[in-house]
Every structure is written in C-alpha cells, then in structure tokens.
Amino acid sequence: MRIITRTVLILSLVSLFADIASEMLYPIIPVYLKDIGFSVLWIGVLEGFVNFTAGISKGYFGKLSDEKGLRLPFIKLGYLLSAVSKPLIGFFVAPAWIFFVRTLDRLGKGVRVAAKDAMLSGESTRETKGRVFGFNRGLDTTGATIGPALALIFLLFYPGEYKTLFYIAFIPGLISVLFIFLLKEKKQPMSTMGKGNFFSFFNYWKIAGGEYKTLIKGLLLFALFNSSDVFLLLKTKEAIGDDTLRFLGTTFNSDTITIAAYVFYNLVFALACYPMGILADRLGFKKVFLGGLVLFAVVYSGFAFNPSIAGIFSLFVVYGIYAAATDGVTKAWVTNIAHNKNTATAIGFYTSCQSICTLLASIIAGFVWDNYGSFYTFISTSAIAIIVLVFFLLRIKDKQPQ
C-alpha cells in the first residue's frame, strides 16, 4: 500500500511554499515590532490575539467543512488570505493596521487547517497516520527552514530592510495557492451534527468519546502554559546581547544569530518529523508525545539560565526534536479517535480551544517577563510541562501500535 499518495504529496508541497512565506517573516516580526514601538507585553498580546483568531475560526470552518462534505474550497481560501496578507504588513506601522494584517494572516490558517488535516486523515489509515502527518509536517517545516534562511541571507546584505522582505514573501505564498489547483475533491460523508451558529462546533464535546475528552484535557493543560515561540526568539536575542559570532568571514550580530538559530531549529524539526511519525505508528502516540514533553522541559529550563551562543544552538536542536515528537503526532492521535464524519470538527474543536489557551499563555508570559524577568517565564513553563507529563502518565491510556 502506498503511504504517501499524490494528494498527500501536493498538500505537503502547498505547506512547504506557504511556510517559506510565513517563516521568512516569523523570526523578524518580533524584532520589527520592537523597532516600531511594541513592548514585549504588547507583542505577547498581539501574538496571542492573532493565534486566538485563527484558532476560534478553525472550529467554525472545520464544522462547516464537515457539513458540506468538502475540503478544497476552505484550503484554497485559507492559503489565499495568508498569501495576500504578507505584503500588507509593510504598508503602515499603526498598531491597528498591524493587528488587522496579522489577524488576516492567521484567519487564513483558521479557514484551511481543519479541512487540510481532515483531507490528510482521509488519505491515511489508522496504521499509517503518524507517517502521513509526519511527512506533511516535515515538508511544512522544511519551508520553515528555507524561509528564515532566505531572510537571514537578505538581511546580511541589506541590514534592517524588513519591509522589503514582507513584499518578497508574497511570491512563495502565491506559489502555494497555485499548487492547490492540482488537487481533486473527494466527496466526504456529511456531518450528522446539524447546522448552528459560529460557536456550534463546541457541541462536538457532547458527542465526543471519553478517550477524546481525556486527551484534549491533557493537551489543553499544556497549551495553557505553552506561549508563542516568539518568546524563545526574544530570549535568544536577550541572552546574546552585544555578543557577535564570526563565521566564514561574516560577522553575525544578535539579530542574525537569532534568525540563524531559528533556521537551525526548523532544520532539525523537519528532519525529525517523519522518523517520529514512524515511531508513533510503531510504539504508540503516548510514548512519543511524553518523550517530547521531557525535551520541552529541558529546553525551557536551559533558556532560563541565559545560555551561551553554543548552548542556544544546542537547546534549539532539542527543541526541534520535541516539536517533531508532538506536533504531527498530536494531530494523528486526535484524528485516530475522532468520529469519521466529524474529523474536521474534532480537529477544529481542539485547535480552537488550544488557541484560546495560547492567547492566555502568551499574555501571562509577557506579563511575567515584563514584571519579574525572563527567568521566571521560562522556569515556570518548564515546571508546568512536568505536571502535564504526570497527568498523561496517570490519566491517559497508552496508545498501542496497530
């Protein structure tokens, strides 16, 4: 049986180019926002808000996808919104405009992600979901490696020219949209939940099984204290300070080292995704996920103590493995225990609640950083990860290999 089908491959290429566009900007956005006057707290509020917008819309559009029995219209619209938002962020620096454009970008993700994950789920079996989601996440993260690398090269030649990058990012975003037109729609079984208002996807909780509910509780407990990766980038810049790194005749300052570390993290993440998917299919989702939580706690503890440049890169290696052990694995796990006719709704429900938690986590992290310092932000997050690990050990049954 072919595991990586034509549809899985095309969807993964779409993710690749879309992430080149998004991640070209991701590591420079917090730096750009600080340059135009945003505090760390307001950066946390912004990132939390836009992720909340994406998340709450994931539930609605996921349920709508199940109601229609369609995936492609949502995938096309979602990637288009994200693509056109890229150049818009460079037009004005007014806070209201920045909030609008970042929200438009994340809304695009909210429109597409549940439908895309449901389509991937439909292209796999219970025995192959770890590999399918791992492959997709691997190419997605390859884009997240290429994007920042391109940004790094550009900034080495044109320091501080952030706005130009916003315009360049539109090109790979447009390519991702064009790839979608190579896909063909497969009619899906329509949801039996019935229609409702914008928040009616929350009704899925009433019909969800006990295994789904317990898993979601554990995942959301973790999300409630797992703030945006923006804080890792800000911590990297803070830890480096005025230090520089000379490599291959080029001097790297804190900005370029921060981007380089983020590129390195995404490279490790991309390379580890498919192997982690294989492990999840063979060993079970729980074992791989818990291993990821341990690595997460190690990384956040390490960042709390202002590591050296070498230490920062080492921690990002570990963080990349953590991400590979949890991201695609979590989606595969959720879709494996969801109702077939409501797969997109189940994913949308989880990701919507996750984004609400991320909003709170980012605000809390920004507040703690501004008032008590970055040490307490990172050490407390590490401690919470251990508590979540204990919850999973005690409350969630192991997912045995199929």
Image (spheres, rainbow, N blue to C red):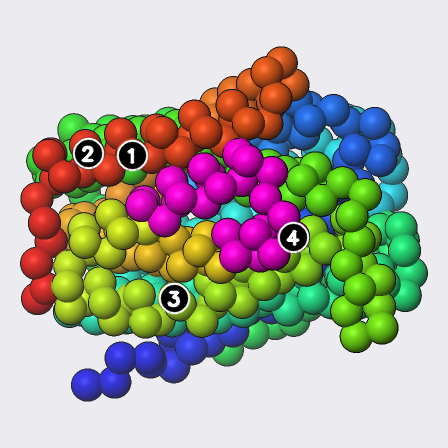
User: In the image, what residue type sits under mark 3?
Assistant: Cys
Q: What stretch is highlighted in magenta?
A: 293-315
- Residue under the point 51% across and 73% down: 13
Q: Distance between the residues labelled 4 and 1?
A: 26 Å
Query: Alpha-carbon neighbours of circle 3 within 10 Å: few (<14), some, or many (≥20)?
Result: many
User: In the image, what residue type sits under mark 4?
Assistant: Ile
Residue mark closest to the camera, 3 vs 1: 1
User: In the image, what residue type sits under mark 1?
Assistant: Ile
Residue mark closest to the camera, 3 vs 4: 4
Residue nearest the observer in this picture, 34 or 352: 34
Q: Does the magenta stretch include residue 294?
A: yes
Instruction: Tell me, yes or no, if residue 140 can be seen here.
Output: no
User: In the image, what residue type sits under mark 2?
Assistant: Val
Label disc, if present, on residue 386 of the rendered structure: 1
Residue nearest the observer in this picture, 285 or 334: 285
- Residue under the point 62% across and 14% down: 371
Circle 2 residue: 390
- Residue under the point 21% across and 71% down: 128
Residue mark closest to the camera, 4 vs 2: 4
Residue nearest the observer in this picture, 214 or 183: 214
- Residue under the point 36% across and 49% down: 295
Q: How far apart are marks 3 and 2 (CA)?
A: 24 Å
